[in-house]
Image (cartoon, rainbow, N blue to C red):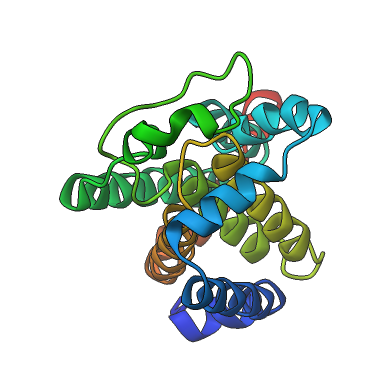
Amino acid sequence: MKIGIKEVLHRIRPFFILYLVVLCACLILKLLYTREQIFFAVNGWNSPWADYIEPYMTDLGDGIAAVVLSLIFLLFSYRKFLLLASSYILTGLVAQAIKYVIDFPRPSIYFKAQWAQVHTVKGVYILSSFNSFPSGHTTSAFSAAVVLAYLSAKKGWGVPALLLAILIGYSRMYLTEHFFEDVVAGSVTGVLVTIFWLSWIESKQFIHSEKWRTGLLKTIFK
């Protein structure tokens, strides 16, 4: 079964079109404003309710959420589990490789002299390392969103998945863990790598066999 990039894009077209619109808006913002201006603008839009919500939002992009969602898929479809889990792993590795090469400081280091002016959320551990670019949470969130859009092409879950991924990316800026550029790059990494990966893995004959269409629950209770 031959599935190319064109077929993958066709299945996720509502998601992808909206993503391109959002990406263009982000690039325009980057052309108009500096890293510092965007960071402090986002940091200035804080409130008690957002301080409460954003840590939970950012948790949706971490490894635990990835494992939980993958295990849910495993119960019903080995194929869906493989697509999601392998996309998580591959995009995560790519993001870590880029972090290693770019070696850009996180906001807490970059703004060390101005950190007293920065609003931080109580109880959130602020990372201070040179692996800010790109955002790993955002990469994982957008990778999962692409897979969900691909698997639910006829159910329209792509757009809600994209909106959730955007909110997760925003939470990384709100919590002062990442810059705007980190989040945008993370989204691009997650989307592009996952699209290429799906076009490759879905072309493999084994993944469309009856065995891979079933899940753990059916295997156990058959």
* Residue visible at 52% across and 76% down in the picture: 32
Which one is nearer the viewer's eye here, 68 or 63?
63
**Any part of residue 77 in sight:** no
Rendering coords of residue 101 (x, y %): 16, 51
* Residue visible at 32% across and 34% down in the picture: 109
Which one is nearer the viewer's eye here, 39 or 180?
39
Please indicate whether residue 161 sits to the left or right of residue 125 in the image: right
* Residue occupying the far bottom of the picture: 6
Rendering coords of residue 35 (x, y %): 44, 59
Which one is nearer the viewer's eye here, 20 or 91?
20
**Any part of residue 193 in sight:** yes
Which one is nearer the viewer's eye here, 198 or 159?
159
* Residue visible at 46% across and 43% down in the picture: 178
* Residue occupying the far top of the picture: 123
Please indicate whether residue 96 sits to the left or right of residue 73 in the image: left
Q: Is residue 168 above or below residue 35?
A: above
Which image quadrant: the C terminus? top right
Q: Is residue 71 above or below residue 154?
A: above
